[in-house]
Amino acid sequence: MIPLSHYLIVSAILFALGTAGVFMRRNLITILLSIEIMLNAVNLTFVAFGRFAGDVNGQIIVFFVMTVAAAEAAVGLALIIALFRHRESLNPDAFTSLKW
Amino acid sequence: MPETLVFYLFSGLAIGASALVIGQRNPMYSIMLLIASFGALSGLYILLDAPFAAVAQIIVYAGAIMVLFLFVVMLLNAPQEDAAAYDRTHPLRHPAITRFGALLAGLLVVQLTWALARANQLAQPVAGRTDAGTVSSVRELGRVLFERHGFAFEATSILILVAMVGAVVLARREDRV
C-alpha cells in the first residue's frame, strides 16, 4: 500500500500550484479555477487521512466540500458575469475601484 | 508493483495538468486541463478505497462545476488574458523580485516534501482497522451521513438555495428590472 505521506505530498504540491495560480494569474476565471485546485488538494488530504484512520468521516467531509465548491463556483461566476458587463474585462486590476 | 505504478501515473497526471492550468493564457484550455486533473484525482480516490468520492468527483466536479465554467467562458466570449502595460510596469514585476519569490516557493515545496517524507508513523493504516471494507462501503457512508451528520446535510440544502438565489440576482441584467 502506498504510504500516507505520498498522498500528502501530492496534495501539498497541488495546493501550492493553486496558490501560485491565485497570485500569478490576471484572469478572474483562472483564479477561480486555481481555488478549485486548492479545494481538491484538501479533499485528497481528507480522503487519504480517512482511509488510513479507518474512518468514513473523511469521505463525508469531501461531500460537504464539494457542495461548498459548487455554491462558490455559482456565486463567483455570477459575480464575474456582473463585473464583465460593467468593464468588458476579466483582469482583476480593472476592478480596483468598485464604485464609479 | 502495479499499485505504485498507478499511483505515480495518476498523481503525475494530476500535478502536470494542474501546472498547465495555471500556465495557460486561454481559459478554455485551462478548464479542459482541469477536467483531466480531476479525472486523475478520482483515480487516486479509487486507490484510497473511496469509490463514492471518486464517482462524485467525476459527476459533480468534472460534470457539473466545470461545465458551468465552460458555459460562462463561452457566454462571455472571454478574451485571452491581456498582459497589459500594468503588468510590465508594476514595481513587483521586477525580475529580481520575481526570481526571489520563485526561490522561496521552491524552498517551501522542498521543505514540505522533506517534512512529510519523514513522517514514518503515517506509513501504514491504523492497526486493527486496516480493512478497506468499512471505509469503502457506500452503505456505511450513507448511514453515517444521514444519522450523525443529518443537520449538516440539511444545512447544505439551505446553502445551495442561497447560492442559487444569489447567482440569479447577481447575474441579472439591471436594465430589465
Image (cartoon, helix red, strand yellow):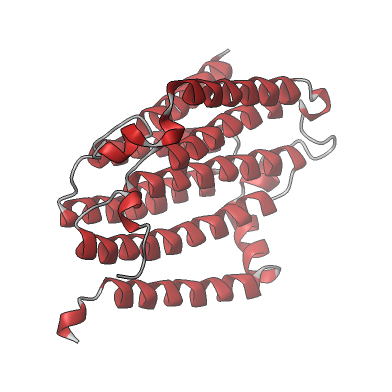
Q: Name the side, left or right, on which A29 lies relative to A16.
A: left
Coordinates of residue A5 in the picture (x, y in percent): 70, 27
Image quarter of residue B76 = bottom left
Residue at left 22%, top 65%? A86
How many discs mark residues in the rendered view? 0
Q: Is residue B71 above or below residue B106?
A: below
Which quadrant, please, contains the C terminus of chain A?
bottom left
Which quadrant, please, contains the N terminus of chain A?
top right
Coordinates of residue B36 in the picture (x, y in percent): 35, 34
Coordinates of residue A76 in the picture (x, y in percent): 38, 61
Q: Name the side, left or right, on which A90 lies relative to B161.
A: left
Furthest residue to the top? B1
Residue A2 in sight in this render: no
Question: Along the line of sight, which residue is nearer the eye, B175 or B46?
Answer: B175
Q: Name the side, left or right, on which B130 lies relative to B137.
A: right
Coordinates of residue B2 in the picture (x, y in percent): 54, 16
Question: Along the line of sight, which residue is nearer the eye, B23 or B81?
Answer: B81
Residue at left 55%, top 37%? A15
Furthest residue to the bottom? B177
Residue B79 in sight in this render: yes
Image quarter of residue B120 = top right
Question: Along the line of sight, which residue is nearer the eye, A7 or B56?
Answer: A7
Residue at left 73%, top 37%? A52
Residue at left 39%, top 66%? A75
